């Protein structure tokens, strides 16, 4: 997970915010539609929809756009019907990569993901080929300025979290997937809404990468993130501060 956070921080620093904002909105709309379609359209009774709505508001999505996406999903057969797919493989340096997608054309998405891996010298594997290297966890993120490391850790543990990974940019609270909503709600009351809250993948161990390997790996991750079909990308790598600074330039 540290690697995933580092990648997100680098992409944020590299700019191109308008382009990325549009892609974020596309992904959020798909998640809102799917969450409303697969559960009740009431966020109080649908944790996935509640998390999607929170993420949309954090991204400054307009109320009208948000409500249209929810209504489209709640309408059942009207509009697009997205299928959840997961792809797994190895990237440069033997880094394990998990790709989660919402797609209305699985052949197109599989082809795009496979092409991204191949161009980077990686290999797309079968489902469960790398997921054993990760734990399924609830992940709640707050900006680092929200609280001190000690204060966030104490509050998170009291709320039922298992651990907190605090860095220069954010606090990442980790918990069991089934505890995500309870931990998020408890921290919300103390610190306000988090930057994000979702179930994801945490690497059991991280592979150090640098030099050309790091550059090629980040090109792969960026290509995957740029796909409208891809919702989340997780990888088990770590890079040094020096590499972070160079890749962010």
Image (cartoon, helix red, strand yellow):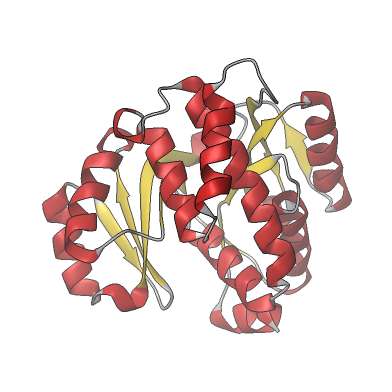
Which image quarter holds the C terminus? bottom right
Which residue is located at x 55 percent, y 52 percent?
236
Which residue does the image show at 69% across and 62% down from the upper left?
Answer: 20
Left or right, 134 with respect to 149, comes to right
Q: How many numbered discs?
A: 0
Q: Position of residue 74 (x, y in %)?
A: 52, 23
Q: Quadrant of residue 218?
A: bottom right
Whether residue 1 sits left or right of residue 240 in the image: it is left
Residue 170 screen position, x and y as percent: 40, 70
Q: Is residue 108 above or below residue 137?
A: above
Residue 143, position as x, y percentages in the image:
38, 71
Nearer to me, 48 or 120:
48
In-image side of 34 versus 114 (left or right)? left
Please say whether residue 30 is visible from this viewpoint.
yes
Residue visible at 58% across and 64% down in the picture: 8
Determine the image quadrant of residue 124: top right
Which of 6/210 is in front?
A: 6
Return the residue found at the far front. 64
- Nearer-the-camera pick, 167 or 72: 72
Q: Position of residue 134 (x, y in %)?
A: 48, 41
In the displayed structure, 149 sits above or below 55; it is below
Q: Is residue 72 left or right of residue 58?
A: right
Whether residue 199 appears in this view of the structure is no
Taking the view exactly as shown, the residue that stands out farthest to the left is 158
Asked whether 70 or 193 is in front, the reply is 70
Residue at 36% of width from left, 35% of height from top? 43
């Amino acid at each position: 997970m540290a690697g995933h956070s580092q990648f997100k921080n680098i992409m944020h620093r590299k700019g191109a915010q308008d382009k990325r904002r549009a892609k974020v909105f596309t992904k959020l709309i798909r998640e809102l539609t799917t969450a409303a379609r697969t559960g009740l359209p009431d966020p109080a009774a649908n944790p996935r929809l509640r998390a999607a709505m929170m993420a949309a508001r954090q991204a400054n999505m307009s109320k009208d756009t948000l409500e249209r996406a929810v209504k489209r999903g709640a309408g059942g057969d009207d509009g697009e019907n997205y299928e959840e797919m997961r792809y797994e493989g190895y990237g440069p340096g033997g880094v394990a990569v998990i790709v989660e997608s919402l797609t209305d054309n699985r052949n197109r998405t599989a082809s795009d993901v496979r092409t991204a891996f191949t161009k980077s010298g990686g290999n797309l594997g079968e489902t469960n080929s790398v997921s054993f290297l990760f734990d399924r966890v609830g992940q709640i993120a707050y900006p680092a300025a929200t609280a001190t490391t000690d204060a966030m850790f104490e509050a998170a543990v009291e709320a039922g979290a298992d651990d907190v990974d605090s860095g220069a940019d954010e606090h990442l609270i980790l918990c069991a997937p089934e505890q995500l909503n309870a931990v998020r709600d408890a921290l919300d009351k103390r610190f306000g809404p988090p930057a994000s809250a979702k179930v994801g993948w945490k690497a059991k161990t991280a592979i150090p990468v640098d030099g050309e390997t790091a550059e090629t790996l980040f090109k792969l991750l960026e290509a995957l993130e740029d796909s409208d079909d891809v919702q989340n990308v997780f990888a088990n790598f770590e890079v040094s501060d020096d590499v972070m600074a160079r890749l962010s330039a």
